Amino acid sequence: MNRIDRVTAILIQLQSKRVVKAQDIADRFGISLRTVYRDIKTLDEAGIPVIGEAGVGYSIMDGYRLPPVMFTREEATAFLTAEKLVQKLTDQSTRESYQEAMYKIRSVLRLAEKDHLEELDDHIAVVENQYLPKSAASDERHLQTILKGISEKAVLDIGYTALGDENYSNRHVEPVGIFYLGRFWYLIAYCRKRNDYRNFRTDRITYITPTPLKFNKTHPSLQSFLDKTGKERELIKIVVQVDKSVLKYFGEQKYYNGFVSQRETGDKMEMTFLSGSLMGFAKFFLLFGEHADIITPAELNQEVNKLLQDISKRLSGNV
């Protein structure tokens, strides 16, 4: 990236947040802090009202705005790709908001980029996977209400049907964050009824209403909850060698069973998985076990043998 493009990009970055640290700019562009200071000075000399505060960062004077920026073809294509994902993976309210934003984005594109998006529109699709569980019939996932509650620190009144026991309850919760896993959106919130943090699958929230109540408590970050969840779920490293001739039959199933990587070893492929359940992986292994060897762990051999013995007993009993 040449210096003119970098300085322009820095200006856009300064407008994207209230305060931007010099180190964040340096990390983004792979430049030294001294270079950051020179680029900021260039903006200042060009008449851009940049405010710098030692130990805090840089900001643009409130009220200053650039004229509409021009997006590159690659950036415009990224927006179109994101639009396809939003259409499939979010709720109606979020889709409508994103569609309105896309109209504004398209309005500032050059004619060539507009034509480019029109041409690509029918060539990008997000397809439902028939092997993954489907969301509930209701399309409402309450994402915008939850995000507004997080932003305004509003206590939310929700009705929730727990997965498994199907018990229904009303809760007052303090929203912390949302995340997408598998085929569902989840809300992490502090539940005032349980006095603890809980996960709520958003498609099982029957209603959600912001209350006049506000919370002042500073909750841990969403990432800290996700990191904790990952640590609590112990993953087991599994290595198997598989005949190359059967790899074409794996399809996407390998990803659902924790596939990490693979490498060639002669006429075989050594595959590495991370699984949370030896028994679950053993059942998956039976699909191709006659064409594979278990390298590690030894406990997986035991699980597979136990399954084979149980199957053999059941089949013998049915003769």
Image (tube, rainbow, N blue to C red):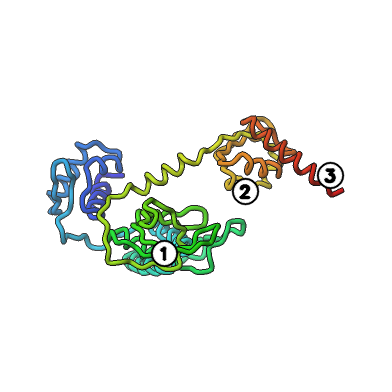
Which mark's residue is nearer the viewer, 1 or 3?
A: 1
Task: Tell whether label 2 touches label 3 (CB within 8 Å).
Answer: no
**Sequence-wise, which precedes: disc 1 or disc 2?**
1
Q: Nearer the viewer, residue 164 or 248?
A: 164
Residue 78 placement (x, y as % from top left):
41, 56
Give the spatial CA distance, label 1 vs label 3. 51 Å
Whether tag 1 and tag 2 are in contact, CB under 8 A, the answer is no
Residue under label 3, please give it: 316
Mark 1 or 3 closer to N-term? 1
- Distance Cα–Cα, label 3 vs label 2: 30 Å
Q: Is residue 235 left or right of residue 17?
A: right
In this figure, which residue is indicated by the disc labeled 1? 170
Q: Amino acid at mark 1?
A: Asn
Amino acid marked by disc 3: Ser
* Residue indicated by mark 2: 253
Q: Position of residue 71 (x, y in %)?
A: 33, 58
From the viewer's perspective, tell me whether residue 103 is left or right of residue 252: left
Q: Which residue is drawn at the image coordinates 27% and 63% (left, top)?
A: 213
Name the residue located 45 percent from the left edge and 59 percent from the top edge: 81
Foreground mark, 1 or 2, reads: 1
Q: Residues within 10 Å of mark 2 (few under 14, many from 20)?
A: few
Q: Percent position (x, y) of residue 77?
A: 42, 58
Three-letter amino acid code of the residue under disc 2: Gln
Quick one: SS at disc 2?
Answer: helix
Q: Nearer the viewer, residue 56 or 312?
A: 312
SS label for mark 3:
helix
Residue count near mark 3 (Cα–Cα under 10 Å), binned few <14, some 14–19, many ≥20: few
Q: Earlier in the sequence, mark 3 or mark 2?
A: 2
